[in-house]
């Protein structure tokens, strides 16, 4: 038998498959993690196929080791890794590793092993191997070199981080209950420990086996247990104990669906029963009861003997959310997210792999959960940007989910109150099936939203951040002992020019995107097409001198708040205050307990807005996100404002939302005020059409990097010519232009953007360009499919 292996070595070679002979007695399978000889090293790899015949002429080397008892990757995942690698221009090995929990990605430790008994006695070894990474002292390094050259020691590679199971001692009964009862009668009067043990065995035998900890809690000593083993009352085994991140919760019953929910579930159910792969876009206003539909659809999948996968954004994977799923599906649920310990993640993952968990709830990377026979996949809040990984491999969980839904023949539900434009457009074309929930589950009204026009208003503080109407409203809530949330939309944070007199924003004449100020060159630049002009001194629209370069920071607003409300307790939540693990939850919990009056934060608070005592939500400046140089600036603004508005006033006290803006007439803001997604969609699609933007065009970003700026530019121009020689209209090739961060770690970056509708050969052409770059090694090349808009120059 011959194994084809993808090895984990420097990127250049990794997409090649290497062949190894499988020696007798080695239990190798597709998906197995193996150790193979590679040159003079031993490295880790994954078997991607097994064949009888080798294409290699020479003598094959043997596989050395199969690492895990069960192949960590299923055949499905191995197949997926090949397709995904091609699709997103990533190395296959990086995808294979991404599919596994961190502890199984394994690294190598270079260790020094003594080669003779004599050498083993050297103090350096202390009878053991030496980790070379820890060897820092110069004289020791010299000594190691000498030992190696004399053959007294050799370097080996050790698979590190071998994920460890947690083992625990468990006591099994060896007798029947009545036999224990008899023994209990015979026991000496003074042997109280033994009595305790025997009476527990006599009365609670069905509760056995019990762990050492459980018995200790009953007050039974180690000596008594030892004695029980000697007398053959009990036997002892080391068994694995899963580290579970969640505690059992009380079961809950399905709610009675309202008519709209029932219709939606019915439609999904048809395809679920028929094993049909179909993507549904579930567009449901905030509070419409999407979660209940998900849960009941999962129940149906389980009833068919199939499994279910539910993805939620990391930030909404709160304990309450998980508890809700657990209360329906109990021990069948496995949870995967970044707050788990390595051990917990490893164990949850193995429960899935072994088929012991049938429902997986997790964040982005859980889309690779090794479930068998998937009957339903759900992606909640499908518009969230975090579903795309923003470093290599840059996969989008939605695309992976679509692939898996085809493989398993199962429905995929994409749910949101504000679907991404791309998904909504696909639903329009019939690629996805559109389902809608237009009312709140219990028919509650949507909250009232007021716009405050910052062009015609008095400011309360010295910083021009908080208007009088908003500060008066805050004052009013403070007096009533109610709470306030203030949101500062600061996505991306770019400096754009805004006129305080007329609200004019300086934009690119070619692209209609806001220009970004560059202080170093004192120019306004378009990060999309490279256009630039001098920084203006007066507003080009109204000639006023009151021009400002935004943005505002949370710290600045906090200062202004303390100035205006010296008595109020203010909590701030932004990247600076949430860097430490658990601080996010801590701030929200503290605010929920009423320990502060005002919670001020960036968009990360939008998800946590479920506080009954919050009656006012203020948006400090709705425009900051609006004029970012991204084609989807309006979409993101609309989305954020709608989500914020939808969270207010969920309880009995009526909620109010106040949005401060210089652009009350902008459609994104006007329609967010009305919480009208469909109208926004229609309007935004016109804008995208006029500008040749997605979803009318697909995009690919090619970035070229080099130590020398001219080289980077020159290579980028060459690539552009190569692209243009093949690609024809309506495909558009833009750039090269310097990247947003044009210089990073002494590398200069230039980018080319390809916009296309249908290009059969584009993928192949780009792979060719990528291969060229690897061959000459003079410059770096990165290809990104569907780049995040803010990464487009
Ligand atoms: P969404 O996820 O669509 O924003 P949720 O699933 O959070 O909405 O539902 C909002 C509220 O409505 C929740 O408190 C939920 O328990 C409740 N709810 C959902 N469906 C029903 C129903 N059929 N009957 C009664 N209450 C419901
Ligand atoms: Zn431009």
Image (cartoon, helix red, strand yellow):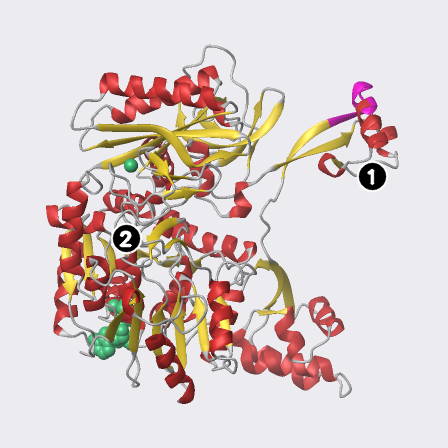
493 vs 274, left or right, is: right
Quarter placement of the C terminus: top left
Q: Residue 317 at x, y = what percent?
A: 41, 63
| Residue at the spot of label 2 | 504
**Looking at the rendering, which quadrant does residue 415 occupy?**
bottom left
Q: Is residue 763 magenta?
A: no
Q: Residue 99 at x, y = what percent?
A: 43, 43
Which image quadrant shows ligand 2?
A: top left
Decide which of 493, 463 is in the foreground and name it. 463
Residue name at image x 47 percent, y 63 percent: 554
Relative to 292, is 113 above or below? above
**Looking at the rendering, which quadrant does residue 167 occupy?**
bottom right
Q: Residue 663 at x, y = what percent?
A: 25, 60
Q: Residues within 10 Å of mark 2 (few under 14, many from 20)?
A: some
Does dot 1 land on a helix, a strand or a loop?
loop
Q: What's the magenta region?
A: 146-154
Quarter placement of the N terminus: top left
Residue that extends furthest to the top in the rendered view of this protein: 57
State if disc 1 and disc 2 touch (CB < 8 Å): no
| Residue at the spot of label 1 | 127
Decide which of 563, 398 is in the foreground and name it. 563
Q: Residues within 10 Å of mark 1 (few under 14, many from 20)?
A: some
Taking the image as drawn, is residue 31 in sight? no
Taking the image as drawn, is residue 40 in sight? yes
Decide which of 576, 397 is in the foreground and name it. 576
Residue name at image x 51 percent, y 22 percent: 708
């Amino acid at each position: 038998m011959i194994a084809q292996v993808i090895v984990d070595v420097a990127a250049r070679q990794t997409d090649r498959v290497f062949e190894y002979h499988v020696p007798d007695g080695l239990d190798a399978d597709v998906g197995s993690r193996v150790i193979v000889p590679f040159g003079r090293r031993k490295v880790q790899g994954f078997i991607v196929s097994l064949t009888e015949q080798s294409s290699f002429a020479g003598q094959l080397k043997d596989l050395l080791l199969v690492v895990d008892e069960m192949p960590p990757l299923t055949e499905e995942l191995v197949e997926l890794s090949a397709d995904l690698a091609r699709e997103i221009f990533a190395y296959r090995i990086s995808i294979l590793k991404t599919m596994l929990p961190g502890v199984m990605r394994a690294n190598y430790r270079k260790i020094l092993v003594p080669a003779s008994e004599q050498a083993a006695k050297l103090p350096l070894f202390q009878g053991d191997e030496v980790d070379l990474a820890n060897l820092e002292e110069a004289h020791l390094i010299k000594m190691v070199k000498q030992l190696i050259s004399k053959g007294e020691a050799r370097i080996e590679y050790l698979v590190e981080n071998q994920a460890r199971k947690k083992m625990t001692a468990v006591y099994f009964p060896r007798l029947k209950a009545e036999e224990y009862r008899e023994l209990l009668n015979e026991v000496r009067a003074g042997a109280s420990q033994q009595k305790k043990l025997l009476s527990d065995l006599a009365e609670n035998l069905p509760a056995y086996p019990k762990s050492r900890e459980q018995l200790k809690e009953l007050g039974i000593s180690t000596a008594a247990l030892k004695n029980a083993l000697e007398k053959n009352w009990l036997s002892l085994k080391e068994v694995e104990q899963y580290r579970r991140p969640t505690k059992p919760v009380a079961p809950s019953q399905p709610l009675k669906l309202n008519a709209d929910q029932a219709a939606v579930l019915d439609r999904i159910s048809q395809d679920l029963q028929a094993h049909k792969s179909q993507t549904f876009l579930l567009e449901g206003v905030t509070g419409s009861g999407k979660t209940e539909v998900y849960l009941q659809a999962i129940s149906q999948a389980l009833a068919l003997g199939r499994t279910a996968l539910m993805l939620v954004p990391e930030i909404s994977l709160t304990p309450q959310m998980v508890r809700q799923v657990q209360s329906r599906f109990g021990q069948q649920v496995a949870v995967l997210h970044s707050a788990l310990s390595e051990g917990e993640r490893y164990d949850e993952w193995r429960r899935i792999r072994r088929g012991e968990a049938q429902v997986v709830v997790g964040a982005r990377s859980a889309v690779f959960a090794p479930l068998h026979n998937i009957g339903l996949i759900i992606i909640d809040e499908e518009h969230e940007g975090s579903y795309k990984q923003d470093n290599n491999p840059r996969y989008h969980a939605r695309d992976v989910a679509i692939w898996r839904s085809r493989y398993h023949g199962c429905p995929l539900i994409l749910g949101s109150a504000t679907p991404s434009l791309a998904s909504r457009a696909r639903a329009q074309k019939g690629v996805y099936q559109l389902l809608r929930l237009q009312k709140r589950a219990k028919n509650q009204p949507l909250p009232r939203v007021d716009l405050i026009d910052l062009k015609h208003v008095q400011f309360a503080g010295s910083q021009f951040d908080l208007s009088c109407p908003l500060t008066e409203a805050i004052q009013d809530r403070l007096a009533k002992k109610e709470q306030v949330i203030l949101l500062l939309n600061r996505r991306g944070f770019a400096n754009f020019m805004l006129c305080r007199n007329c609200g004019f924003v300086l934009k690119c004449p070619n692209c209609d995107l806001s220009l970004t100020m560059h202080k170093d060159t004192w120019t306004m630049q378009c990060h999309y097409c490279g256009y630039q002009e001098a920084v203006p001194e007066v507003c080009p629209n109204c000639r006023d001198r009151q021009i400002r370069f935004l943005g505002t920071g949370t710290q600045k607003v906090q200062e202004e708040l303390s100035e205006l409300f010296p008595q109020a307790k203010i909590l701030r939540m932004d990247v600076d205050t949430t860097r430490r693990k658990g601080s996010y939850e801590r701030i929200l919990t503290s605010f929920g307990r009423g320990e502060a009056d005002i919670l001020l934060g960036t968009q990360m608070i939008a998800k946590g807005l479920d506080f009954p005592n919050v009656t006012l939500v203020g948006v400090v400046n709705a425009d900051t996100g609006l004029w970012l140089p991204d084609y989807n600036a309006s979409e993101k603004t609309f989305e954020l404002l709608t989500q914020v508005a939808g969270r207010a006033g969920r309880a009995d006290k009526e909620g109010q939302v106040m949005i401060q803006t210089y652009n009350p007439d902008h459609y994104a803001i006007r329609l967010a005020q009305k919480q009208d997604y469909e109208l926004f969609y229609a309007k935004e699609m016109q804008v995208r059409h006029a500008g040749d933007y997605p979803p009318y065009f697909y995009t690919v970003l090619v970035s070229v990097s080099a130590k020398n700026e001219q080289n980077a530019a020159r290579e980028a121009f060459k690539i552009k010519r190569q692209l243009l020689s093949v690609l024809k209209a309506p495909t558009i090739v833009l750039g090269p232009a310097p990247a947003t961060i044009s210089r990073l770690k002494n590398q200069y970056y230039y980018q080319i953007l390809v916009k296309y509708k249908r290009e059969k050969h584009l993928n192949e052409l780009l792979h060719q360009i990528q291969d060229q770059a690897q061959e000459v090694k003079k410059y770096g090349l990165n290809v990104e499919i569907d780049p995040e808009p803010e990464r487009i120059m």
